[in-house]
Image: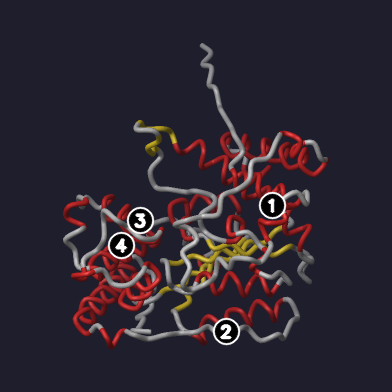
Amino acid sequence: MEIAINLKFRPSPWFIGVLAELNERYPDWTDGSYDWAAQTTDFLHTPSALPEFDDTIFDTPLSRRAVNDLLNIAIALMAGDFPLVRRYTAPMHFAFVIGYPRSGGSYLTKELLRTIGLDHTRVSEALAHDGFPELRDNWFDWSQGKPYFHLQEAVFQVAEFLVISSLYYQKKSARHPHGYWLVPKKMHKIIYWGGSFKMLLGDGRADYLVTIRNPLPTAISIFEKSGGLPDGGRFPARQARSAIEKWIVADLISLGHSVNEIETMDYFAAVQRSWSHFHARMATSGLFLGMRDEVRIIPYGSEPLEEMVREYRARQMDDTPPEPALIHDKSGEFPQWQDGATEAVAAMVALWASMGLEFPEVGFA
């Protein structure tokens, strides 16, 4: 019996945007006019529109190579041909920066890019930040009022990321003294496919840098970036003001909370439940599969973050000091949330310990 399966693939705007940049067709993509690592700007909520390109973008030798590589890698991913994928990614060593929003990931990614000689404002947020590839724990999503199959799209975006990052970093940065190209990537969504990524890439092919911050200063940082604490201190479930607040709503809905229930929640309670959901999911995601020491836990703070940058620069034989990680502690302004934050951290320490993992007892920084 034969079963015909039709696969429809349309390159994502992010893949085409980086490809256009590599072909010197899209200078505005990395003109330095925006800073995805800015602490007060939520570019994810109102992303810059990408221009439309005609099919001539695919006529160059570089583009033809990219599309050919992309189709081969995408088919290999769907067919389970991991040796082919490992051969393709062999020249690269990934540094995945993983963490709940507002826990230092953008700072660390920015500094790792500087470590390989790149100005982060000239590296697209699609390539460096955590919106692409779009990984989720649900295979189905909604589009135009009806469900559609997300998994196929996500697999193609993983292939796009592997291909476009390979071409980009080999063209834009120098080879590491140890012979590979370092690929920094802020990628908190990897927790949805943690074990799959580790099995796909293999041991010794990536570092997984996990930044962890106390939920109280995290909540403060989130509402400050989103426009301030809402009137009444309730979470704005129906009028989420930023991409992060939208993610929190999605987390809470996945836990069974209705939108009506979420909008009655205290702001900190909503963030804390999302924070707990994220870190519990991380522990069980397969991220620790294989070589556990590939996962580096970095408690939020100036010294741990800067020390990690210094470590990477030492590997590059570069003694340039990192830019300071600016830490603002405003937790004392919200004493009503401190007990809840302490209890949430203690609960996560216990949960991780029950699985043989160590969660840091992060304070109110």
Which residue is depicted at the point 67% across and 35% down? 71
Q: Give the residue number, with chain letter if any, for mark 2.
A: 307
Disc 4, SS: helix
Image coordinates of residue 29 in percent, x first then y, are 66, 56
318, 236: nearer the viewer: 236
> Which comes sooner in the sequence, label 2 or label 1?
1
Q: Give the residue number, with chain letter if any, for mark 3.
A: 246
Separation of residues labelled 4 and 2 (CA atoms) = 28 Å
Q: Give the residue number, with chain letter if any, for mark 1.
A: 89
Disc 3, SS: helix
Separation of residues labelled 3 and 4 (CA atoms) = 11 Å
Q: Give the residue number, with chain letter if any, for mark 4.
A: 274
Which residue is depicted at the point 20% across and 68% down? 266
Image coordinates of residue 68 in percent, x first then y, are 73, 36
**Which residue type does callout 4 highlight?**
Ser
In the image: residue 262, left or right of residue 148: left
> Which comes sooner in the sequence, label 1 or label 4?
1
Image-quadrant location for residue 310:
bottom right
Judge whether 356 appears above or below 169 on screen. below
